[in-house]
Image (cartoon, helix red, strand yellow):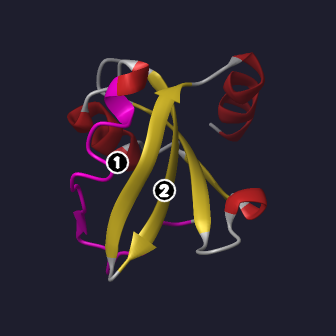
Amino acid sequence: MIIDKVVAEFEWDEGNKDKPKKHGVTIGEAEEAFFDDNKVVFSDWIHSAKEKRFTLLGKTRRERLLNIIYTIRRKKIRIITARDINGKEVQLYEKAA
């Protein structure tokens, strides 16, 4: 899946800015993964009851592999959470790269 070019920015507010920190991920790292040319994005249909959610597997500039759950609201990327990827997800990322 290609991230819509119309989406021009990230949305961070009190409701979501601290969630990546719970997993030791900075806001900057979470945003960097979206610019990884080898990122993998798929629909998170299990958690899409109220709004469409996506999962992104991507790498930061420091080579950290992240799993990011996000949605798009008003043409802005709203990151729900971010964490390091697990072994199965590493395989998914490497297959696609």
In this view, 19 is above or below 12: above
Which of pointers 2 and 1 lies earlier in the amino acid sequence?
A: 1
In this view, 44 is above or below 76: above
Task: Name the residue rendered at 23%, 55% in the picture.
Answer: 12
**Disc assigned to residue 81:** none
Q: Position of residue 59 (x, y in %)?
A: 44, 30
Task: Point out the frontmost of discs 2 and 1.
Answer: 2
Task: Name the residue rendered at 59%, 59% in the picture.
Answer: 54
Q: 10 Å neighbourhood of mark 2: few (<14), some, or many (≥20)? A: some
Which quadrant holds the N terminus? bottom right
In this view, 70 is above or below 52: above
Amino acid of disc 2: Tyr
Quick one: SS at disc 1?
Answer: helix
Describe residue 37's horizontal placement relative to residue 91 as left or right.
left
Describe residue 82's horizontal placement relative to residue 40 as left or right.
left
Describe residue 89's horizontal placement relative to residue 9 as left or right.
right
Which residue, given by chain and number where applicable, does mark 1 sit on?
35
Q: Main secondary structure of the magenta part?
A: loop
Kindly indicate the quadrant of the structure image that contains residue 82: top left
Amino acid of disc 1: Phe
Magenta stretch holds residue 15? yes
Task: Name the residue rendered at 62%, 36% in the picture.
Answer: 97
In the image, 78 versus 19, the foreground residue is 19
Q: Position of residue 81 (x, y in %)?
A: 46, 42
First to last magenta residue range:
2-21
Which residue, given by chain and number where applicable, does mark 2 sit on?
70
Task: Name the residue rendered at 76%, 64% in the picture.
Answer: 45
Q: Position of residue 85 (x, y in %)?
A: 59, 24
